Image (cartoon, grey):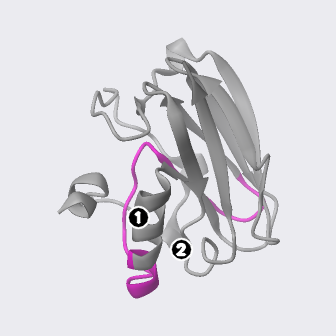
């Protein structure tokens, strides 16, 4: 099943409500696994930094981001709200499917390089390389947030 391959859940991952992204230590090796939206980026090859704010209005700022294919972006993801929020990269269909899964299993544990779970008044970094041109998205998949419109667009130019 596509969902299982795309959103595999590692055994030692944290639940959404327990995520402490700001204190997270990544494995030393960078994953070369390709996803629909690209792959985990090398911190030593960051092209630029983009700040993204998440708030309790269930919106991202900015709501649209433009990057070039091949760019490695450091997203500095800030949660300016009082609720838990996250930024998850994917296609619209992947995010919608994952959001539906989160509705059924709100305490589902997972932690992937294309996700930043951020506690209120905290921030986290997510480093991602965009290897394919096209239109992709980022969303908050905390139950109810995606459905409430917490989604942004990434346009990857050639």
Q: How far is disc 2 from disc 1 in space, using C-alphas?
A: 8 Å
Left or right of 111, for residue 10: left
The picture quadrant where one finds residue 155 is: top right
- The residue carrying pointer 2 sits among few (fewer than 14), some (14 to 19) or many (20 or more) residues within 10 Å by Cα, namely some
Q: Quadrant of the C terminus?
A: top right
Residue drawn 43% across the image and 42% down it: 113
Observer able to see residue 117: no
Predominant SS of the magenta segment = loop
Left or right of 153, for residue 81: right
Expressed as whole percent of the image width and height from the top left, the position of residue 22 reads: 60, 48
Expressed as whole percent of the image width and height from the top left, the position of residue 40 reads: 41, 32
- The residue carrying pointer 1 sits among few (fewer than 14), some (14 to 19) or many (20 or more) residues within 10 Å by Cα, namely some
**Which is more toward the observer, 78 or 69?**
69
Q: Secondary structure at mark 1?
A: loop
Q: Which mark is residue 124?
A: none
Please check the rendered image and state whether residue 107 is part of the magenta-colored stretch, yes or no.
Answer: yes
**Which is more toward the observer, 155 or 140?**
155
In this rendering, is residue 97 above or below 79?
below
Residue drawn 50% across the image and 57% down it: 92
Q: Which residue is mark 2?
A: 17
Q: Which mark is residue 14?
A: 1
Expressed as whole percent of the image width and height from the top left, the position of residue 24 reads: 50, 46
Expressed as whole percent of the image width and height from the top left, the position of residue 89 reads: 51, 48
- Of all residues, the one furthest to the left in this rendering is 1
Q: Secondary structure at mark 2?
A: helix
The picture quadrant where one finds residue 144 is: bottom right
In this rendering, is residue 17 above or below 124?
below
Residue bounds of the magenta highlight: 101-122
Residue drawn 53% across the image and 44% down it: 136
Please check the rendered image and state whether residue 76 is part of the magenta-colored stretch, yes or no.
Answer: no
Observer able to see residue 41: yes
């Amino acid at each position: 099943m596509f969902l299982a391959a795309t959103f595999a859940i590692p055994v030692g991952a944290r639940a959404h409500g327990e995520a402490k992204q700001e204190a997270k230590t990544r494995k030393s090796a960078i994953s070369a696994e390709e996803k629909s939206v690209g792959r985990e980026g090398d911190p030593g090859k960051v092209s630029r930094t983009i700040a993204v704010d998440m708030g309790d209005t269930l919106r991202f700022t900015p709501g649209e981001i433009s990057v070039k294919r091949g760019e490695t972006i450091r997203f500095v993801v800030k949660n300016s709200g009082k609720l838990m929020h996250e930024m998850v990269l994917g296609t619209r269909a992947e995010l919608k499917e994952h959001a539906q899964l989160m509705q059924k299993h709100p305490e589902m544990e997972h932690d992937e390089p294309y996700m930043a779970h951020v506690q209120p008044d905290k921030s986290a970094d997510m480093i991602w390389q965009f290897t394919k041109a096209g239109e992709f998205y980022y969303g908050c998949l905390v139950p109810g947030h995606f459905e409430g419109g917490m989604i942004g667009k990434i346009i990857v130019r050639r």
